[in-house]
Image (cartoon, grey):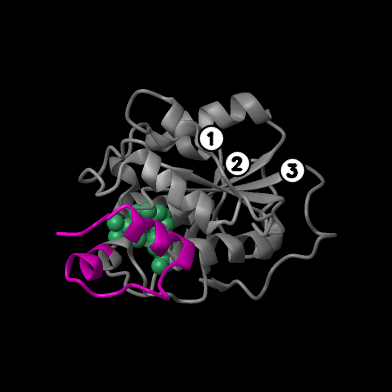
Amino acid sequence: MLSLATGISASDAAMTRRIGLLGGTFDPVHYGHLRGALEVRDCLDLDEVRLIPSARPPHRDQPGATAQQRLAMVRLAVGEHSGRHGGLVVDDRELQRNKPSYTVETLESLRGELGNTVTLFMILGWDAFCGLPAWHRWEELLQLASLVVLQRPEQDQDLPEVLKDLLAARSINDPRQANAQHGQILCLSQTPLAISATHIRALLAGGQSPRFLLPDAVLDYIETNGLYRP
Ligand code: ATP
């Protein structure tokens, strides 16, 4: 894993638009997501990172909050309405589709809209990367975007053999080489934040406060709407 401190300079970056994509259930969004998105943006000199809430996540239990509530929390988290979003933006395209949120279809939709010259980086935590072979049409993902895999402090999953082979074939070691429009894999270690939505939901269900693990505006929304209570 490379340190995010060894970022590329603006002059090294390709002249094409460089966009990061962080999909997730965001049930709820927390500082692990936000800090990771921001550090990848700075390390790879991205124009923006889009946070893309999943409407109906196909690979997991149904979320504790509705899609609209999770979207509202992501909007609050990035401060979209205050103008202090720091290059993080919210993309709600998966909520516009009336079917499961397959990432490959999201990438196809983004390519259709943004064209083939933009450089797309799909950001994944280590746990999500380890589960990739179960994703719908997963082998096509690298034809549409490059992958940025973030270390998580609590990560304990072993990498499936097929992903070891993929890493051997596709990984690059230096963020300065991350210039292909798609097809590369870069493993990065962000500032370790052992925060998960599961833990936050468990704290709330147990009557404890998750304050300082997620933005205050998100916690206020959770409390106002009575989310994640037993
Ligand atoms: P849950 O605990 O409900 O599974 P989560 O905290 O893992 O949720 P997701 O919305 O499932 O959050 O995560 C979206 C993406 O962000 C995934 O790729 C995940 O690996 C990554 N991610 C989540 N938390 C962190 C963290 N603390 N550090 C690095 N990556 C993270």
In the picture as drawn, the residue positioned furthest to the front comes out as 224
Which residue bears the numbered disc 1?
A: 143
**Sequence-wise, which precedes: disc 2 or disc 1?**
1
In the picture, measured across the screen, residue 73 lies left or right of residue 155, that is right
Q: Amino acid at mark 2?
A: His
Q: Amino acid at mark 3?
A: Arg
Which residue bears the numbered disc 3?
A: 17
Residue 154: give x, y in percent of width and height: 32, 73
**Sequence-wise, which precedes: disc 3 or disc 1?**
3
Q: Residue at x 85, y 59 (%)?
A: 11
Quadrant occupied by the C terminus: bottom left
In the picture, measured across the screen, residue 199 lies left or right of residue 173, that is left
Where disc 2 sits, the SS reads loop
Front in this rendered view, residue 11 or 99: 99
Which class describes the residues within 10 Å of circle 2: few (<14), some (14-19), or many (20+)?
Answer: many
Where disc 1 sits, the SS reads helix
Which class describes the residues within 10 Å of circle 3: few (<14), some (14-19), or many (20+)?
Answer: some
Q: Is residue 4 magenta?
A: no
Q: Residue at x 33, y 72 (%)?
A: 210
> CB at mark 3 closer than 8 A to ligand 1?
no
Magenta-drawn segment: 201-230
**Sequence-wise, which precedes: disc 3 or disc 2?**
3
| Closer mark to the observer between disc 3 and disc 2 | 3
Residue 195: give x, y in percent of width and height: 36, 71
